[in-house]
Image (cartoon, rainbow, N blue to C red):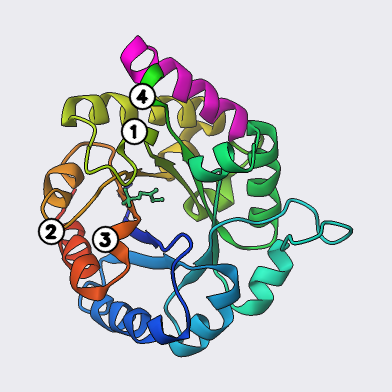
Amino acid sequence: MTRRMYVVGNWKMHGVAEDIPQIQAIAEGAKSYPGVDVALCVPSILIERAARAVPGFPIGAQDVHFAEKGAHTGCVSSAMLRDAGAKLTIVGHSERREGQHESDEEVRSKAKAALADDLSVILCVGESLAIREAGTAVMTVQAQLDASLPEGAVGSVATRLAVAYEPIWAIGTGKVASLADLGEMHAALRERLLVAYGDAGREVRILYGGSVNASNAAEIFAVEDVDGALVGGASLTADKFLPIVEAAAAIHR
Ligand SMILES: O=C(CO)COP(=O)(O)O
């Protein structure tokens, strides 16, 4: 089976009403690359306006609560995201694992809740610089994936689940994992997906994230088992983001 390339922007804490034209430019530009799945994850308060501005283009969230509803001040459920027009959500980004002390168990619950509510999910994993330097990155990230993946039969929803490998030291730093390290990690994560889901594990896309830009996207996408990218800074404007989508469109597996 072939996995479609997937390029997703993570706007993090950027974006107000005046940025909607950039979202429209990205959605319009993405139409030139029908072979690539493209999406943008924006701040939750912008989802509804963004989704209305670009009908048919997937707008997503950057986090979701695992509960359906209840006493969770400041949180947003998957049903609320869907109601606002979101089609996907990121879970377990390292900035939340660190900043909001999210555990693997919590990330797993969030992924399960979102998948059950028909959202697509991008589940993030990645190691710190200390772990990379200690030489234990692969086993650490595999264990993180094992503990964060929704367990059980994923079969029918495998195409709605993606994993994003984002080494923490590569996020926003201009540093990118070496292509050899990237290939090793993506193969190691594929192995865990096959253990967890059997053949359906082949359908789950594995994205790379961390300082992806127009200049390095092509070589990153050429690495086996890299099925696209989760892009931060370079997703904020159409002129920086669309060349990354174009690089993905050039991959034929
Ligand atoms: O964290 C990231 C995407 O989720 C990567 O961010 P940058 O592309 O800005 O390094």
Residue visible at 31% across and 64% down in the picture: 235
Residue visible at 68% across and 77% down in the picture: 83
- Secondary structure at badge 2 equals loop
Q: What type is the residue that disc 3 sits on?
A: Ala
Residues rendered magenta in the picture: 131-148
* Disc 1 Cβ-to-ligand 1 distance below 8 Å: no
Residue visible at 30% across and 38% down in the picture: 170
Label 4, on which residue? 129
Q: What type is the residue that disc 4 sits on?
A: Leu
Label 2, on which residue? 250
**Dot 2 and dot 3 residues touching (CB under 8 Å):** no
Kindly tell me whether residue 93 is visible in this rendering: no
Q: Distance between the residues labelled 1 and 2?
A: 28 Å
Residue 37 is marked as: none
Quick one: which residue is furthest to the right in this view?
A: 71
User: Of the residues tagged 2 and 3, which is closer to the observer?
Assistant: 3
Q: In this view, does 168 lie to the left or right of 218?
A: right
